[in-house]
Image (spheres, grey):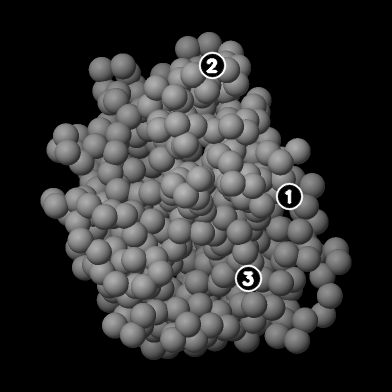
Amino acid sequence: MTDTVDGLVRAQAARFRDKPFVVDPMTSMSYTELDTVTGTLATALVNAGIGKGSRIGLIMPNNVRWVQLALAITRVGAVLVPLSTLLTTRELIAQLQTAAVQYLIAVEDFRGHRYLDDLPALPALRQVWRSDELRSGTGVSGFGELTETVVPADPMVVMFTSGSSGAPKGVIHSHGSALGAVRSGLTARCIDADSRLYLPMPFFWVGGFGGGILSALLAGATLVTEEIPEPEATLRLLEREKVTLFRGWPDQAEALGRRAADVGADLSALHPGSLDALLPAEHRRAPGVRAKLFGMTESFGPYCGFRADTDMPRSAWGSCGKPFDGMEVRIVDVDTGDALPAGTIGMIQIRGPHTLRGMCRRSREELFTPDGFYPTGDLGHVDDDGFLFYHGRSDDMFKVSGATVYPSEVEAALREIDGVRAAFVTDVAGRVGAAVVCEGATTDDLRAAARATLSSFKVPTVWLLLDSDDDVPRGATGKVDVHRLRKLLEA
């Protein structure tokens, strides 16, 4: 049964054998080793008392060991709870309690964070292991019998997420919903058995776990990752591993593109579908021509897209593509919940087999509409051809002199200005505020350029120029912290 992690691991090991499955700068693991290593680790877990439904937290950086532990956990029907390496002790405790984590596997420290030093006794938490303490198990443990009881409807993972504000939410996905979501997006991502996929996104995010580990596993591809991306080391890794598909961050791709010539890195193995900044000029496309895959943790990654190496129809430029098979999208009035016609902006609701199975400490009635749609909180419109256009968050839109401003629209316009690498827009006491990462531009330059493409009421009147994207305040899940951003702009 390839709709469970155990069935998928067995099937792909039999098919791809000695082919590398995951590679980090220090080691690699083949598909055969994936089956054997995760099997013996799963035996150790069962011997330690872990069973189907046990909730196991995992906090460590991207590497082969993370993959081994995560897939061992899910093979036996235990529930994986990936935890951010960015968490403070207070935040870690809150997430452990929210997800009722019973076992915790963690590195002792990473990038200045020490996760176990001040961890108190928690009612649900039974045992804590350092990541190097858990050894492979031997002997009869019931591992095989457990895997046979796991079905696609069983919970597989609790992924923590948050919007631009608010406490993180523990989103529950089953084997079937998670693997189905990843499978539906493989074509749009251009991932197949020939892909050598580089993905630096943390495995504790759905973009890393689903978009990286599970995507490679389902496609029979090779995943290349690293703990701490650094430009020169990353370029050498891409070159050495002959990476064909780069799916990192746009800012990272641009930085690597600027350094590639100086380093002398050979990136000729990269295929279209990778981020444009690393491709030869003849393979780059104008902004908006290719779809931006669109999704959320509640849909286990993208639920909407278009082949990343293919131009969309002209009328769809700037869109997120079309919903994947099995997923329904409808646009409703933010206030009334009434369905809206094509071309009208409203809240996006989604329904389908790839949506979340539930959320920690939340009832189904709190999460879904009576007819089973999940209100995403995102704003968008669908055109007559079924392409989805994103317009920001419903809790981010605001009024200026009675007119509605969608931050994403203003951000998109600012990003088209020469020298602007990133832009973040929010309401500042009824005015449009913009924090902009740019080089060689003044606020007067930005204001003048913005007036050429935006209505006057949408042009920012409060500006903050930043040297680096690192200066943008973010929460533990990596998303922009709008409240802190607003305070910076107010100051």
Residue 48: quadrant of the picture: bottom right
Q: Quadrant of the N terminus?
A: bottom left
Q: Is residue 247 above or below residue 72?
A: above
Label ID, residue 57 = 3
Q: Quadrant of the C terminus?
A: top right
Regarding residue 138, the answer to whether it shows in the image is no
CA separation, marks 1 and 2? 41 Å
Tell me which label, 1 or 3, sits earlier in the chain.
3
For marks 1 and 2 on the same chain, the one whose residue lies earlier in the sequence: 1
Q: Please give left or right for residue 237 compared with residue 290 in the image.
A: right
Report the disc number at residue 200.
Answer: none
How far across and how far down the image is residue 372, in percent? Answer: 32, 80
462 is higher (above) or lower (below) than 90: above
**What residue would you read off at disc 2?**
445
User: Which element type, helix, strand or loop, lies under badge 1?
Assistant: strand
Tag 1 and tag 3, C-beta contact below 8 Å: no
From the viewer's perspective, is the residue at label 2 or at label 3 nearer?
2
Where residue 134 appears, x then y in whole percent?
A: 66, 68
* Mark 2 residue type: Asp
| Residue beneath disc 1 | 110
As displayed, is residue 339 above or below residue 199?
Answer: below
Left or right of residue 120, residue 327 in this image: left
Measured as percent of width and height from the top left, residue 79 is found at: 52, 77
The image position of residue 400, as x and y in percent, is: 51, 45
Can residue 485 be seen in this snapshot? yes
Amino acid identity at mark 3 = Gly
For the point 24% across and 48% down, the residue is 321
Label 1, residues with CA under 10 Å away: few <14, some 14-19, many ≥20: some
Of residue 280 and residue 171, the one placed in the foreground of this image is: 171
